[in-house]
Image (tube, helix red, strand yellow):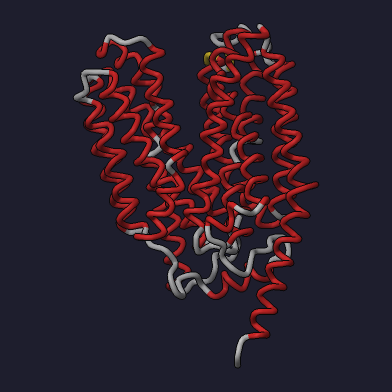
Amino acid sequence: MPQALGGTTAASRTRWMQLLLGLIAMMAISSPQYVWALYTQHLTASLGATLAEIQVTFSVLIVLQTFLSPLQGFLIDKFGPKRLLSVGAALTGLSWIATAYVDSLWGLYLTYGMMGGIGTGIIYVGVVGMMVQWFPDYRGFATGVVAAGYGFGAVVTTLPISRSLSSQGFEQTLILYGFIIGAVGILAALGMRRPNGNGVPSKALAAAAANPAVVETVRSFTSKEMLRNPIFWLLFLMMTMMSTTGLMVISQMGAIARDFNVADALVFGLAALPLALTVDRITNGLTRPFFGWVSDKIGRENTMFIAFSLEGAAITVWYFMAHDPFWFVVLSGVVFFGWGEIFSLFPSILTDTFGTRHATTNYGFLYMAQGVGSILGGPMAAMLYASTGSWGAVFTVVVAMDIITAILAIAVLKPMRSRHLQANAVNNAVLAAAAPA
């Protein structure tokens, strides 16, 4: 973990406070995604709808959270984080409050799905975009911390919400926790700002410049320039493939457990499926700051190769051992430990490559890969399973994606970025020499 936290100056304390506020904001808006399953039974009964119709809401939430992220990032870059993040937190809270009053599927799609997707997307992209600017020396670690907050946040709310559903009913629960998550998110957002001017401590800038493992561009690229660069599209392809592998496991975990006859088998006195989901949530959170920190030390591409290879190996072994409830639980945790780090590595390497000035907007474009992965890892994986009648084909495809992405990181991305950074440095040196004294 970081040893010297950038000194003890006021500027240093400010950026660590920004990290704390970003962590709180991410924890506040994580519940719409991670506790959704607690509401589905109540909503099907209240609206007289099928589970499939209700689940469309979740798809709307994820699609809008990801596919609107470039626009959301642009607005945050243009108007600043305080206003936009406050709006995002307010929309997230209001999406739950409004859901308590809906009486139709379309009302559910518009409130929990659309309002929630837009609100959580603003917070997610905005917070990550600010952390890569505040922490040039610990970029991987800082983005990993806030990304972990998004995964861990629901751990705080899951049990209280479950109890409230039993005692208060789902309408009152939605209203109560809508106010809570909205208020907490707004309070955190009101304290957040970008590191304009001399906001980043000079020691942090010097440490980043002296780090041989992580080389950063000497100028910032606009989104238009970035989208013309093949490195971005390689990163988009890699993040899409890695998103697909993890989201396949997330979306199909229940079906896999039932097909392997381990869903209700006891491990340490607990049913294997819920225990695995709990372990996965923990490892999925821990891996984000851990591998982010590792990447700050040994480089992004080297860390990608290690983590993505681990993911591929873990899924392979998991498939052959999944009939054993104990190994089903343990290895599913390893699978998520090899996957969750994509949410710290990709925003970090994108900012290293294309600069900090437009980092939030730029990451918005890359984050769309998560939306593509949700389609490939969910419905497409289910269709492949249905057509083959076996999980073997699905596992083969996702393992191949893991291995291909690991190889691309070290064999293609690393030399491409090296040439890009060298050319960028040379161009700036020529411009500096030609400038009038």
Question: What residue occupies the far right of the structure in this picture?
Answer: 411
Question: What residue occupies the far bottom of the structure in this picture?
Answer: 437
Left or right of 307 in this view: 134: left
Q: Quadrant of the C terminus?
A: bottom right
Residue at x 40%, y 21% (from the top left corner)? 56
Residue 231 drawn above or below residue 276: below
Residue 386 drawn above or below residue 31: above
Residue 6 drawn above or below residue 185: below
Q: How many marks?
A: 0
Q: Quadrant of the N terminus?
A: bottom right
Depth check, front residue: 149 or 429? 429
Residue at x 59%, y 38% (from the top left corner)? 340
**Is residue 109 something that shows in the picture?**
yes
Depth check, front residue: 66 or 311? 66
Instruction: Residue 140: give x, y in percent of width and height.
Output: 59, 53
Left or right of 304 in this view: 243: left
Depth check, front residue: 423 or 164? 423
Left or right of 147 in this view: 163: left
In which quarter of the view is residue 27 placed? top left
Instruction: Residue 329: give x, y in percent of width and height.
Output: 61, 21
**Is residue 155 something that shows in the picture?**
no
Instruction: Residue 33: give x, y in percent of width and height.
Output: 41, 31
Instruction: Residue 295: give x, y in percent of width and height.
Output: 67, 52
Residue at x 71%, y 47% (from the top left corner)? 303
Residue at x 62%, y 40% (from the top left corner)? 239
Left or right of 241 in this view: 174: left
